[in-house]
Amino acid sequence: MAKQIIPKKYAMPHQDPQVRAKNFDEVALGYTEELAVAEAERCLNCKKPFCKEGCPVSVDIPEFIALVKERKFEEAAKVIKRTNALPAVCGRVCPQENQCEKFCVVGKKNEPVGIGRLERFVGDYIVQKDERIEKAEPTGYKVAIVGSGPAGLACAADLARLGHSVTMYEALHTPGGVLMYGIPEFRLPKAIVQKEIENLKKMGVEIETNAIIGQIASLDELFKEEGFDAAFLGTGAGTPYFMNLPGENYNGVYSANEFLTRSNLMKAYCFPECDTPVKVGKKVAVLGGGNVAMDAARTALRLGAEEVYIVYRRSRAELPARLEEVEHAEEEGVQFLFLTNPTRYVGSEDGWLTGLECIKMELGEPDASGRRKPVPIPGSEYVLPVDVAIVAIGQGPNPLLTNTTPDLETNKRGNIVADESTGKTSKEGVYAGGDVVTGAATVIKAMGAGRTAAKSIHEYLLSKS
Amino acid sequence: MYKIVAKKTLAPAIHEFDILAPKVAKKAKAGQFIIVRVDENGERIPLTIADYDREAGTITIVFAEAGYSTKKLALLNAGDAVQDFVGPLGVPSHIEKFGNVVMVAGGVGVAPVFPIAREMKAAGNHVVGIMGARNQELIFWEEKMKEACSELLVTTDDGSYVRKGFVTDVLREYVEKEGKPDLVMAIGPLPMMRAVANLTKEFEIKTMVSLNSIMVDGTGMCGACRVTVGGETRFVCVDGPEFDGHLVDFEEQLTRSRQYKTEEQHALNRGGCGCGGGGKCHG
Ligand SMILES: Cc1cc2nc3c(=O)[nH]c(=O)nc-3n(C[C@H](O)[C@H](O)[C@H](O)COP(=O)(O)OP(=O)(O)OC[C@H]3O[C@@H](n4cnc5c(N)ncnc54)[C@H](O)[C@@H]3O)c2cc1C
Ligand SMILES: Cc1cc2nc3c(=O)[nH]c(=O)nc-3n(C[C@H](O)[C@H](O)[C@H](O)COP(=O)(O)OP(=O)(O)OC[C@H]3O[C@@H](n4cnc5c(N)ncnc54)[C@H](O)[C@@H]3O)c2cc1C
Ligand code: SF4
Ligand code: SF4
Ligand code: FES
Ligand SMILES: [Mg+2]
């Protein structure tokens, strides 16, 4: 008899929207063992798994799901970790609907298999398990990793596993990159990131925080004075873009990076017990429609804002954020103003933001990408009264390192030029990957790039001897 | 952790610390700053590098108790340590032989001016130091400044020491008597830097100021420190801290520096929420 098809993913327990909009605890609570096994049963174990092609690092999806069915969770984790070092993180933050799950055959007629949820379940299982850390024979080679975001973390883990001596330099006082300072606790608990970083330390990776390469030492000095044999640059895309609208420097206008850093990294949510303040405002406008915008909006709600608007110039269908985050934001009470474009900030005489002037847009002719282009409706300007505005329209590469390394090729946007299949840059022994190469992208892509570079660095080091 | 190896109280509520940070000391240059975080719950506060000793591996900072975090820092003593200490940050001062250079220091501004004056003199400039404080009690590092400068002029707002007057009064008298210097550099409170810039604009003297905008990361990542210079937005932490004083929008800087006044007062009077920093207090 044919197996009965269950049309929907097994629901993951969530905190109630009313309650969670007021706390920073995680929103999605994760599958229990029973739910995980039940969801795994929905997978058809395809001979030709299309899902795997949708994953940027080609996780062996049917293989790990089959092990979940058998309740062999540790083995399942091993399978995932062959290609993805941080399943507990990716299971939570990957835009699965555009990647693995988009291609799942079950998804043709029904909801796809909840690959992300299963990956998260396996990741959490293993995080709690205290994995055995295998240490390799030391090779005697020293590799410097600059930046401790997902790209750097993944690269460091692979190199340490191969026996190289790895030192990771991080500009901030806490390692983890965007995982620590950008993505909020309610979406990615910091304890999970810290646990992964502890594992790296157990593998012998040295982490130097408060160390900005380009300021405390140049890349060349790392090679010449500190004796490194190779370096990986994973410095991310941390510099916030502004729209250059009139009034952008009024008090109350934040970049999303500042707002989120104050709240996440500096724990402004427990001011004054923690010393860093943040202005929350009563009415908050967030400019942009990506993950960063959703995170800023939901953080503002949790910090006590009464009304939070997402101001986005296109329509709902074009929102670049993960679907789940958009839904969560809506459930929590974030208001979406689609087809609305900010034109200037309005302020009081003493320099405080009082409003955001916007113009309404309509969809015009399709542009080169086939998407209908939003065009302003003349005369439709109006002022949205807000006392805080958060700009979340994107970030560019941080120039501190590239400015002091003249022989490192960058493109006109300031991204480091690196070969996609090897991570090799224009400078001998120097590899790069993640957002600093691609521009703002995703956690899994950054990790994939870190691992690709680790492989090339290993080959490079062996070829030296 | 970064150890405080020496502490001196220079004037009421103004302290000097030598902090052990050999890698920062190795690279530090005049005009740069560091960011310090006192403890695990601390905010990141920027302070200028007032001096460095590459051999001893120490950085000297001088700070005024301005609010909660600097008061907390002031409670530490030699032998204690701060949680985080990152630098050197910002672009070093541009040092070359300009000719006659006037270095104007207001209040705690003496500390950041000192290493720049010393380097300017070493580069062959005739360096005139002008230092001012509200009263005699608040004057510090006069001997060090005498050594760093070719000549030093001191003033107090209330006339309790040397003479009465603002640094701008001394600067005006100097320019009227000795003629235009090739460069003026002013470091101190914003209103003082604005006053110097207004004066030198009148005389058309190139003037650099060192801005102390509110910062978080100090690496160009947050934009908190932005300032309008010549109509363009710049980030003080990576593009500065020194800018052409005739191009800086001081009004905007003053407004931005008051952004957290209410919260700062709250922090000072804090009872504390009792969450111990675990973040469980919310909700
Ligand atoms: C708010 C927010 C939400 C996001 N949500 C998602 C999501 O849901 N799903 C998803 O897939 N992606 C998401 N992203 C994108 C994702 O986080 C990034 O693509 C990813 O973190 C890039 O990794 P990275 O290692 O290249 O750089 P980063 O994570 O940016 O890390 C770079 C690190 O390098 C450090 N650094 C920089 N310069 C230097 C230097 N000179 N010396 C030493 N250290 C230096 C930085 O301080 C930083 O810690 C989000 C991003 C943000 C900002
Ligand atoms: C590049 C730079 C160099 C500086 N060098 C010195 C120095 O050598 N000696 C010295 O005494 N002070 C210096 N400052 C100022 C010093 O950082 C502030 O006095 C300090 O942060 C105040 O913190 P607080 O919590 O004690 O006071 P608060 O009560 O929090 O603030 C008092 C005032 O300080 C400013 N301020 C508050 N938070 C910050 C912040 N995170 N960053 C910058 N300014 C802030 C605001 O204008 C505020 O109104 C410098 C600032 C900058 C940006
Ligand atoms: S890493 Fe991301 S894309 Fe790949 S299988 Fe896991 S959740 Fe899907
Ligand atoms: S495509 Fe879907 S059903 Fe097939 S193996 Fe992948 S997850 Fe399972
Ligand atoms: S302090 Fe964050 S960008 Fe300058
Ligand atoms: Mg403070």
Image (cartoon, rainbow, N blue to C red):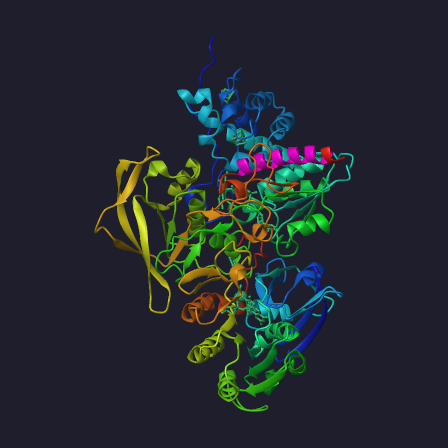
Number of marks present in the image shown: 0
Magenta segment's dominant SS is helix
| Residue A141: in magenta span | no
> Residue drawn at (57%, 64%), measured in percent from left and top?
B45
Identify the image quadrant of the C terminus of chain A. Answer: top right
Q: Residue furthest top?
A: A1
> Residue drawn at (78%, 39%), measured in percent from left and top?
A140
Q: Is residue A393 visible?
A: yes
Answer above or below: position of A416 versus B236. Answer: above
Query: Relative to the observer, which residue lies in front, A134 or B130?
Result: B130
Query: Relative to the observer, which residue lies in front, A74 or B257?
Result: B257
State which quadrant residue B7 falls in: bottom right
| Residue A451: in magenta span | yes
Q: Position of residue B123 (x, y in %)?
A: 64, 72
Q: Position of residue A353 (x, y in %)?
A: 36, 61
Q: Is residue A21 visible?
A: no
Q: Position of residue B254 (x, y in %)?
A: 44, 70
State which quadrant residue A355 falls in: bottom left
> Residue drawn at (55%, 27%), measured in percent from left and top?
A58
Answer above or below: position of A257 versus A349. Answer: above
Answer above or below: position of A122 versus A44. Answer: below
Q: Residue furthest left?
A: A379
Ligand 6 in which quarter: bottom right
Q: Position of residue A440 (x, y in %)?
A: 49, 43
Query: Relative to the observer, which residue lies in front, B29 or A59?
Result: B29
Magenta residues (range): A443-462
